[in-house]
Image (tube, rainbow, N blue to C red):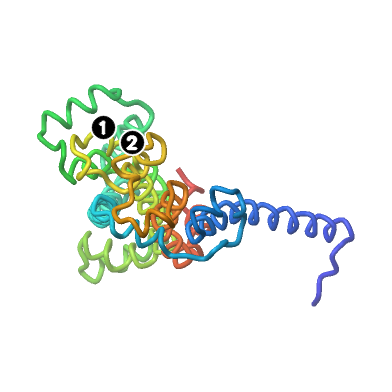
Amino acid sequence: MAVKMSSGYRLFSMINTCFLLLLGVACILPLLHILALSFSSASAVTAGEVTFWPVDWTTAAYENVFGKKEYLVAFWVSIQRVVIGVSINMLLTILIAYPLSKENSQFPGRTLYAWYFVFTMLFSGGLIPWYMTIKATGLLDTIWALVIPSAVPIFNVIVLLNFFRGLPKELEESAKLDGAGPFTVLWRIFVPLSMPSIATLLLFAIVGHWNSWFDGLILANHTENYPLQSFLQTIIIKLDPAYLTPRDAELHALVNNRTSRAAQIFIAALPILMVYPFLQRYFVKGIVLGSVKE
C-alpha cells in the first residue's frame, strides 16, 4: 500500500536534498579547481584565468612530478605504510575486540581490560615521552616508526567489539557444539558476519595512514624517509625550493609552482578517491551497528 506523504514532509525532503547537493558541490569544487590547475599552462595559472576547467591544456605538470625522484620515493613510502600499517591495525583490532566482546562470566576481568584500553585513548604520555620511547627502541628513520605507535586504534576496537556483541550468541554456541575453537569461531563466523563494520574500520585505517603527515616530519631525520603527505607539507607549506625547481628547460616554460603543487596534491588524493567508492556502502551501516551497545 502506498504511503501518502504530507506536504510538510515533501518540503523537508526537498530542502534536505537541495542542502545535500550544495554541500556535495562545495566539497567537489576545490578538487575540480586543483585538477584544472594541474592541467593548465603556467601562464594561464599566473594570470588567474583558471577556475574549474583547464586553460591551455598541458600535462607538463604531471611529467614534472613523475620526473621527481623525491616525490616517487615518498609515494612508495606511503604505499608501504598503508599496506603494513592497515594490516597490523586490522589484525590487532579483530584479535582485541573479540575477547573484549565476551561477558565477564566467559572472560574474567574483561571490564578491567576494556577500561585499560579506553584509558589509553583518553590520556597519553605526551609528545616528548612518545618521541623518546620511539627513539629508544631504535625505530627512527624506519617504516616501523610510522606504523608501530599507532598499531592499536582504540576507537576502532570499541566499534568492532560492540558489533561483535550484537551478533547472536547462538551462532557461537552451535559452533562450539560442533567442536570449533575460539579462532575458528572468530575467523569463520564473527569476521564474515562483521564485514560492514570491518570495511568501515578498514576505510578509517587507510585514510588515517595515507593522510598522516606530522609523525613523518618528526620521526624521519632524512627526507627520503618521508611519507607522501609529509613530503607535500614541505613543498606546499614550507615551499622548499629544492623540490620546486623543474628538472629540464622545456618543462620550466610550462610549469610553475602552483601547477606542480596542484598535480602532486591530486595524485596524492587519487588513491583514496579510488578506494572509497568500494567501501562507502558499508560506511553508515558499519558505524550504526557498531555503536549501539557498550
Q: Residue 191's spot in the image, x, y percent?
A: 33, 63
In the picture, measured across the screen, residue 194 lies left or right of residue 149, that is right
Residue at 24% across, 42% down = 146
Q: Position of residue 211 (x, y in %)?
A: 38, 47
* Residue 290 in view: yes
Secondary structure of residue under mark 1: helix
Residue ID for mark 1: 218
Contact, mark 1 vs mark 2 (Cβ under 8 Å): yes
Q: Is residue 289 above or below residue 177?
A: above
> Which quadrant would the N terminus be assigned to in this image?
bottom right
The front one of 225 and 294 is 225
Q: Residue placed at 39% from the left, 53% from the top?
A: 264
Say whether residue 183 is left or right of residue 249: left
Circle 2 — which element? helix
Is residue 102 something one can see in this rendering? no
Residue toward you, 244 or 104: 244
List the single residue furthest toward the bottom: 1
Q: Position of residue 182 (x, y in %)?
A: 22, 59
Which residue does the image show at 45% across and 67% down from the upper left? Answer: 278
Residue 184 in percent (x, y) is at: 23, 65
Q: Is residue 2 above or below residue 43?
A: below
53 relative to 263 in the view: left or right: right
Q: CA distance from mark 1 to mark 2?
A: 7 Å
Report the quarter where the C terminus lies: top left
Q: Is the residue marked by circle 1 packed among few (<14), some (14-19), or many (20+) residues within 10 Å?
A: few
Determine which residue is flagged by label 2: 214
- The amino acid marked with disc number 2 is Phe
**x 20%, y 63%: residue:** 181
